[in-house]
Structures are given as C-alpha cells and as structure tokens.
C-alpha cells in the first residue's frame, strides 16, 4: 500500500518530468525548423536543468540516509541553483515564443506546434513552481528517537543517602579533592 507521502512526492516528480518533457519537445521542434538560430538554447537549458535536478535530488536523498550533513547542504544548494536556472530558462522560452515568427519565419507556432505556445509554457512554469513550493508545505511528522521512548527503571534510590552529590567544576578538569574524599 502506498503512503500519502509517496504519492505526494510522486506527483511532484511527475510535474518536473512533464515540464522537462515539454521543454525538450520545444527544443526538438525549434531545432528542426530553425537550426541556424539560437532559439533552441533556452528550452535545451530548461530541459537539461530539470532533468539533472533528479540526479542531484537522488544525491541529496542518499546523503540524508547516510547522515552526511555537509553533503546534504551541498546537494540542496546545487538543486536550488539548477531548478532556478531551469525556471528562468522556461521563462526565457516563453519570452522567445512571441518572437518566433519574426526571427525564424519558417517557425510558424500555429503550424509547427499545433497548440498555444504561451499556454503550454505557462502550464510548464506553474508545474515547476508547484514542484518547488509544494514539498515545503507538506507537514512533516516528528520522528521520535527510540532512546526517548525507553522508560527508565522504576527501581531507583530508596533513600537520600544513596544520591551522590557532585559539584559542577568547570575550572579544573581533574577530579576535585571533594570528589576524591567521597
């Protein structure tokens, strides 16, 4: 049985996959009709960044499981940079789409793509923004340490003489004369 957390993060991953696939589709269409222009650069960067974010995310998950705190931070930083670049490249693709007919007349958006490019790019950007924001809204359940759950034994000292008094001694790391006398 799948847990809700697995389903939730599966949907988030699907959003990123759909956005990356859309960018690679745009890349292939623009590259085939206008190979001499650099219009294909933005969707290629967007798709590449979004796809490589899965590799970085996997490194982050492995680092978390192995308790490598510095690697967790590095992978998280790299993931944020890659996703940010990908989101900017999606925006650049959206901005370029309005100029396709002027820069490359062979690339008529209504014929080549068959869909409204602006709507598809907007959906792609919204999917990315949701995939970034949604995991941060997901409420984590507190993890209880097994040591905290263990109960201390009921049998303790029965009289006040069994308690041993040890003063806090921050100045001398060696045992004080008082402790040695007791």
Image (cartoon, grey):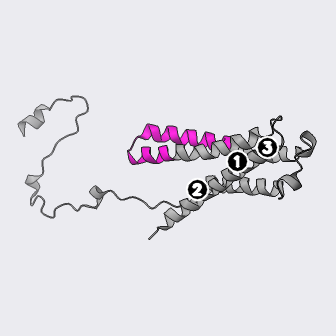
Asked which quadrant contains residue 37, the reply is: top right
- Give the image location of residue 24, x and y in percent: 70, 48
Work out how far the residue at label 3 is from the one at label 2, CA to CA, in angstroms: 29 Å
Would you say the residues marked 3 and 2 are in contact, meaning their CB atoms lie under 8 Å apart?
no
Front one among 167 and 50: 50
> Taking 127 as reference, is 176 left or right?
left
Front one among 115 and 10: 115
Rate crowding at label 1 as few (under 14), some (14 to 19) or many (20 or more) other CA atoms within 10 Å: many
Q: Residue at x 29, y 58 (%)?
A: 146
Note whether 138 is above or below 168 in the view shown. below
The tag on residue 32 is: 3
Residue reaching furthest front? Answer: 32
Mark 3 or mark 1: whose residue is earlier in sequence: 1
Q: Secondary structure at mark 2?
A: helix
Residue bearing the label numbered 2:
13
Would you say the residues marked 3 and 1 are in contact, meaning their CB atoms lie under 8 Å apart?
no
Q: Secondary structure at mark 1?
A: helix
- Give the magenta-colored segment's residue range: 58-86
Q: Is residue 29 magenta?
A: no
Residue bearing the label numbered 1:
24
Rate crowding at label 2 as few (under 14), some (14 to 19) or many (20 or more) other CA atoms within 10 Å: some
- Give the image location of residue 100, x and y in percent: 88, 44
Q: Residue at x 71, y 56 (%)?
A: 126
Rate crowding at label 3 as few (under 14), some (14 to 19) or many (20 or more) other CA atoms within 10 Å: few
- Give the image location of residue 110, x and y in percent: 88, 55
Note whether 111 is above or below 68 in the view shown. below
Mark 2 or mark 1: whose residue is earlier in sequence: 2
Give the main secondary structure of the magenta stretch: helix
């Amino acid at each position: 049985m799948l847990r809700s957390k697995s389903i939730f993060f599966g949907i988030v991953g699907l959003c990123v996959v759909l956005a990356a696939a859309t960018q690679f589709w745009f890349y292939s269409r623009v590259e085939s009709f206008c190979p001499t222009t650099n219009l294909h650069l933005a969707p290629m960067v967007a798709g590449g960044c979004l796809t490589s974010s899965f590799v970085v995310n996997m490194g982050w998950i492995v680092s978390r499981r192995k308790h490598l705190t510095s690697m967790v931070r590095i992978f998280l930083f790299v993931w944020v940079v890659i996703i940010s670049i990908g989101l900017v490249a999606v925006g650049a693709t959206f901005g370029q789409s309005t100029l396709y007919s002027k820069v490359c007349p062979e690339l008529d958006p209504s014929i080549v793509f068959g869909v409204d490019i602006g709507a598809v790019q907007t959906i792609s950007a919204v999917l990315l923004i949701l995939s970034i924001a949604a995991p941060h809204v997901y409420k984590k359940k507190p993890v209880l340490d097994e040591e905290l759950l263990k109960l201390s034994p009921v049998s303790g000292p029965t009289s006040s003489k069994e308690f041993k008094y040890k003063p806090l001694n921050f100045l001398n790391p060696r045992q004080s004369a008082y402790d040695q006398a007791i």
